[in-house]
Amino acid sequence: MRQNSVRGPRARKSVPGAREKDGTGAPASDGADPSEEAGRAGTGGAGKGGPAGGKGVKPGKDEKPGKSEKPAEGEKSAKGEKPAEVAGGAKPPLGRRSRAARIARWAALCLAVLVLGTSAAGYLYYQHLNGNLKKDSLNLGDKRLDRSAANAAGQRPLNILLLGSDSRNTPENVALGGAREDADRKPLADVQMLVHVSADRSNMSVISVPRDTRVTIPKCTDPADGTVYKETNRQIINTSLMNGGPGCTVAAWEELTGVPIDHFMMIDFAGVVNMADAVGGVPVCVDNNVYDKLSGLRLEKGTHNVKGEQALQWLRTRHGFEDGSDIGRTHAQHMYMNAMVRQLKAGTKLSDPDKLTDLAEAATKALTVDKDLGSVKKLYDLADDIKRVPSGRITMTTMPWVSDPWDPDAHVIPKPGDAEQLFSLVRRDIALDGKDPKKNDKGPGPSAPASPKGSIAVTVFNGTGTATQPVVTGRGADIAAALVQQGFTKATSDSTPRAQADTTLSYAKTSQRADAEALAKALGLPERAVRMSTAVDGLTLVIGGDWRKGTTYPKAEDAPAPDGKGAKDGKDGKDGSGSKPGKPSGDKAQGEDGPQDGKPKKEADDKAPESSDPLNGNDTSACMKVNSLNRF
């Protein structure tokens, strides 16, 4: 399906969200936190002198309540007798005592009601925010990749797919997005970003895929009505959302990248506008005056704080920047997302509780999330986890691409070599900025030599049936048999289905490291394939989609790309440039810094390829290059 319209990118919603407005554009009145109101009421409710919070009167040294004088010598106080006189010989008046008791009881009762009322208000508001969230299935495909394995410390990476929907299913979205004739059309996923948070939370990588990328969209079943959408390789990735919802886009991403997706978040036009308002605007920069009449974006040269509808225009425009394609739009979205993250981490816009309430309303009303992420607490825990990543260790990239030989003027496809290098780094949890210290996925060194081959037990799984490729029947049994022939007589296979792009050999204890290395040597596995993991009980070998034949692991130059296909360059030579699209033709072209044969780069190249246009999260100097056709 060819997409030439400028619908789209709601993008950047790195921090998804949306808030409803009244007719004036001001925040809706229901944004106030009832628990705050109850708290304010409670502050004055107890009163200064009340038992709930007042200071009260401390008894003097000689006024210890309840302590009577000792009975006279020889006298005994028995039940039923009148109480002994208090110090000074006077009894407290009966009316005063009963009145004090009533005050104490009422104060205690008021305090209990106040506490319960405040808690109820907080709970009701929490339930209100939960009710704002929309939820959908995570993956609608028939196959799903196994979750990323835990590292030696028991930590797992997080992979979250951020989607921008061009839905016009509400009057507000129609007003913002135009194209009223599309109000009843199923939405397209015009903005797609994979957010990878490293297992140790030290860094974050973001990969955008242009909406016009032709990919294989797997078979998906719509959970709402049971409609089955057949697998196709003739459509572009933004149409995957029409095949049952965001769960089909997740399936398409797993097929494209080999990266298992843990969660998704989707936002619409109105959500972007309301979220931008809630955070108080986001600073962006243009190197010239720009006016794109299709998106409505109009800015003079320099830095601007965009918010509301102007933020949406920034995220949607593609004709305004660089060469006027969807590629330039992804770069503008990266600038916006980086700036928004810096704003949120700085907290300057959110020090006011009312603004925090606005943000909570905006975020929950704007979002559609997978069912496992469908509560405010889970979203909060996720945000609290991610915020540990320093902004200087965030890297924004765009999937390296070349023009599609089937439709070179409209569509692109992943660039052979470079695209796979980028995806492989994410699968191996390696930072795209190249600043990772040497990873020690193996844990401490072995304290003893490897055991005799015949005593090393290993279980082999067949993980070749990925989202990208069909299972190669019998691979687990074949490799186990090959190990037995080499003397590893305790090698066995397990038919439990697995699915992963890369072959891995995991072990649970430091004492098993030498045995794992002996197995790896026997099979020709690279060093990166061996890791210590708390997710296994013993030595566990999973044969991935990268090892589909033979009993010795293929060398790097022989390894197939995970999609098993590769891709040829477009006939017209159009491709993504190592520099930004739209630069003069004399600049370095994308293919010049990497192989063109579809094979991954050397393992040593543990950094995002230049063709992915990496942008650091702390880079405040970036400024969008304005398309010369859209200046004023």
Image (cartoon, grey):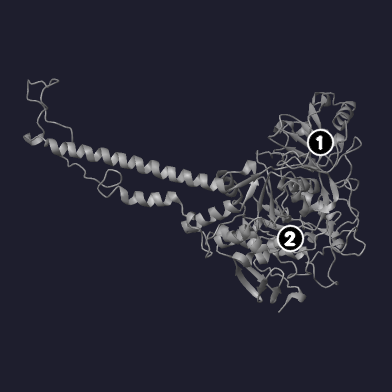
Image spot of residue 397 (x, y percent) = 74, 58
Image spot of residue 402 (x, y percent) = 85, 60
Q: Are marks 1 and 2 in contact (CB under 8 Å)?
A: no
Image spot of residue 155 (x, y percent) = 65, 41
Q: Which residue, given by chain and number where applicable, does mark 2 sit on?
A: 614
| Closer to viewer: mark 1 or mark 2 | 1
Q: Is residue 176 left or right of residue 55?
A: right
Residue drawn at the location 81% of the way across and 36% of the way down: 463
Q: Residues within 10 Å of mark 1 (few under 14, many from 20)?
A: many
Height in image: 614 above or below 440? below
| Amino acid beneath label 2 | Pro
- Closer to us: 157 or 286: 286
The answer to whether any part of residue 618 appears in the image is: no
Task: Tell me the quarter of the image containing the C terminus.
Answer: bottom right
Q: CA distance from mark 1 to mark 2?
A: 32 Å
In the image as oriented, which residue stretches furthest toward the bottom?
632
Q: Which residue, given by chain and number where applicable, does mark 1 sit on?
A: 463
Image spot of residue 586 (x, y percent) = 85, 72
Q: Quadrant of residue 251?
A: top right
Q: Residues within 10 Å of mark 2 (few under 14, many from 20)?
A: many
| Amino acid beneath label 1 | Gly
Numbered disc 1: secondary structure: loop
The answer to whether any part of residue 17 appears in the image is: yes
- Closer to us: 58 or 433: 58
Task: Tell me the quarter of the image containing the N terminus.
Answer: bottom right
Numbered disc 2: secondary structure: loop
Residue drawn at the location 72% of the way across and 54% of the way down: 187
Q: Which mark is residue 382?
A: none
Q: Earlier in the sequence, mark 1 or mark 2?
A: 1
Q: Quadrant of residue 227?
A: top right
Height in image: 452 above or below 468? above
Q: Is residue 372 left or right of residue 85?
A: right
